[in-house]
Image (cartoon, helix red, strand yellow):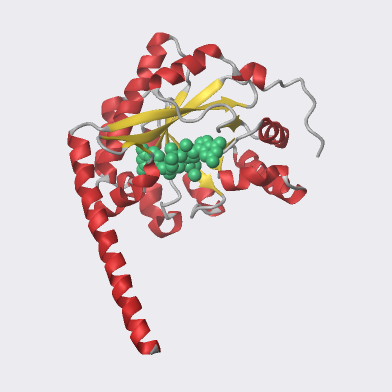
């Protein structure tokens, strides 16, 4: 009986796997069409300086304007794009669009010191990346590449270090994304000397719940300060988060409390209205611990 059930389960399992494979193949083909038809759009999430409360940057986050399924977040397609090899092309499109948008904001007088673009491991070692950056010819400090946690810093070893050094030589900054939950080791901070590190939102979210959670973030801030690396927190969802983070010495905030990722027009409205300055009243007392 057990044996028969086992076999039946195997059949069900096989069918499920085959369905996943078929779905992936379908998405993979659609991604290529999407590239051809220019269906990728870039949203921007503001990064606010904890010191000045000015916008210090914007993170570019890709969206897929799917003809039937509507606007899709990266969770629906990045993993497939990574396994099927179209991620490097998608990242290239995002980089180009984000750099052009940033330039346009500057020309309109919307002050956004830098734009940050996520970059997958495959794209990082792609020689085309340096070529794209040379074409963009960014003003030093105006472009930042966020290295994703899917990049195994330790495995790639020196080739990663070489790529990062070449990128930095072109005046582009590097940031470690999702710090504290991904593969990025503390040692990689010494090897890569990033300009920024971004504390993952899984570490940020619980800071309202206890001392240990806050001390952990304080220690990361200390590491950053010791090495001269700016520290930004992602997933800042409430005023309480922002205040605690400011008191812990974080340099910048990014999260729903300030704004979700916005399309270009909404981003411009956000930057002009400056509503967050009143919402985040610096003079108010921090909440009781
Ligand atoms: P990430 O780089 O860590 O980006 C932050 C993600 O957190 C974004 O999700 C953003 O919408 C979300 N987020 C922002 N503020 C908050 C908050 O306060 N609370 C919560 N719960 N979430 C917040 P999104 O846009 O769905 O992107 C997911 C991931 O997809 C990104 O994580 C990044 O790893 C990847 N990704 C996005 N765009 C690109 C791209 O152009 N290329 C590559 N290779 N990966 C990308
Ligand atoms: Mg990121
Ligand atoms: Mg992140
Ligand atoms: Mg993340």
Q: Is residue 89 above or below residue 154?
A: above
Determine whether, in the image, residue 105 is placed left or right of residue 229: left
Which residue is at a point 66% across and 16% down the rendered structure image? 278
Res 164 seen here = no
- Of residues 42 and 157, the one drawn nearer to the viewer in this rendering: 42
Residue 30 found in image quarter: top left
- Of residues 271 and 120, the one drawn nearer to the viewer in this rendering: 271
- Of residues 70 and 29, the one drawn nearer to the viewer in this rendering: 70
Which residue is at a point 32% across and 22% down the rendered structure image? 100
Q: Is residue 131 above or below residue 163?
A: above
Residue 78 position in % (x across, y down): 34, 46
In which quadrant is the N terminus drawn? bottom left
Which residue is at a point 36% across and 35% down the rendered structure image? 62
Which residue is at a point 74% across and 51% down the rendered structure image? 212
Determine whether, in the image, residue 104 is placed left or right of residue 257: left
Res 50 seen here = yes
Image label count: 0
Residue 220 position in % (x across, y down): 64, 45
């Amino acid at each position: 009986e057990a044996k028969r059930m086992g076999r039946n389960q195997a059949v069900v399992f096989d069918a499920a796997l085959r369905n996943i494979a078929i779905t992936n193949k379908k998405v993979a083909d659609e991604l290529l069409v999407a590239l051809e038809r220019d269906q990728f759009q870039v949203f921007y999430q503001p990064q606010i300086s904890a010191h000045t409360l000015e916008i210090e940057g914007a993170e570019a986050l890709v969206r897929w304007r799917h003809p039937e399924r509507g606007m899709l977040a990266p969770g629906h397609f990045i993993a497939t794009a990574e396994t099927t090899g179209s991620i490097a092309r998608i990242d290239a499109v995002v980089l180009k669009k984000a750099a052009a948008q940033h330039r346009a904001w500057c020309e309109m007088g919307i002050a956004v010191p830098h734009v940050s673009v996520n970059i997958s491991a495959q794209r990082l070692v792609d020689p085309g990346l340096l070529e794209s950056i040379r074409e963009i010819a960014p003003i030093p400090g105006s472009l930042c590449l966020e290295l994703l946690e899917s990049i195994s810093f330790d495995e790639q070893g020196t080739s990663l270090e070489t790529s990062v050094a070449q990128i930095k030589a072109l005046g582009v900054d590097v940031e470690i994304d999702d710090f504290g939950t991904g593969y990025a080791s503390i040692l990689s901070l010494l090897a890569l000397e990033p300009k920024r590190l971004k504390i993952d939102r899984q570490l940020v979210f619980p800071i309202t719940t206890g001392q240990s959670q806050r001390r952990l973030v304080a220690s990361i801030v200390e590491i950053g300060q010791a090495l001269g690396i700016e520290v930004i927190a992602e997933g800042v969802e409430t005023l309480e988060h922002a205040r605690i983070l400011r008191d812990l010495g974080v340099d910048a905030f990014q999260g729903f409390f300030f704004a979700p990722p916005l399309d270009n027009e909404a981003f411009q409205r956000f930057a002009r209205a400056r509503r967050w300055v009143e919402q985040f009243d610096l003079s108010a007392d921090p909440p009781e611990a």
